[in-house]
Image (tube, rainbow, N blue to C red):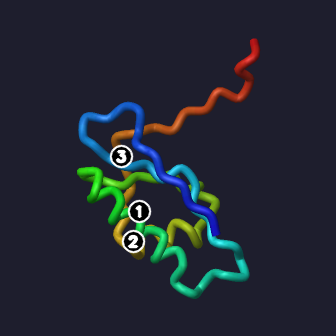
Amino acid sequence: MYGYTTRPRVSTEPGVYVQDLYVAPGARGRGLGCELIRAVRERAAEQGASYVKLTVYDRNPAALAFYHGIGFESCEDELPLVLREPAQ
């Protein structure tokens, strides 16, 4: 089980971005993911955040179902970008 949160670098509203959240396969189905998100939500509220944001790969339907099931929604106003060869 691994979790890490940080504030986003650019935003018009205060929020929290979950960088990595992982529950080991053998520990899944015990509510640990829900507990981690609950802790993130509590910490976000303490910091005055108006949202919690994270990124999920579309090829991970189990994670998508989990996050949608606990209330996360798709964010239409952002487009993920990646620079695959930065040393050119």
Label ID, residue 76:
3
Q: Residues within 10 Å of mark 2 (few under 14, many from 20)?
A: few
Camera-nearest residue between 32 and 47: 47
Q: Is residue 63 left or right of residue 71?
A: right
Residue labelled with disc 2: 38
Q: In terms of secondary structure, where does tag 3 sit? A: loop
Q: In the image, what residue occupies the spot 24% across and 51% down?
A: 48
In percent of width and height, residue 50 lies at 24, 52
Report which residue position mark 1 lands on. 40
Amino acid identity at mark 3:
Glu
Q: Mark 1: few, some, or many residues within 10 Å (few <14, many ≥20)?
A: many
Front: mark 1 or 3: 1
Cα distance, mark 3 to mark 2?
24 Å
Residue placed furthest toward the front: 46
Residue 28 location (% of width, % of height): 63, 81
Q: Position of residue 23 (x, y in %)?
A: 63, 71
How many residues crowd mark 3 within 10 Å: few (<14), some (14–19), many (20+)?
few
Name above or below for residue 3 compared with residue 66: above
Pinpoint residue 22: horizontal percent, then vertical percent: 62, 65
Check whether the beta carbons of the residues at disc 1 and disc 2 lie within 8 A of each other.
yes
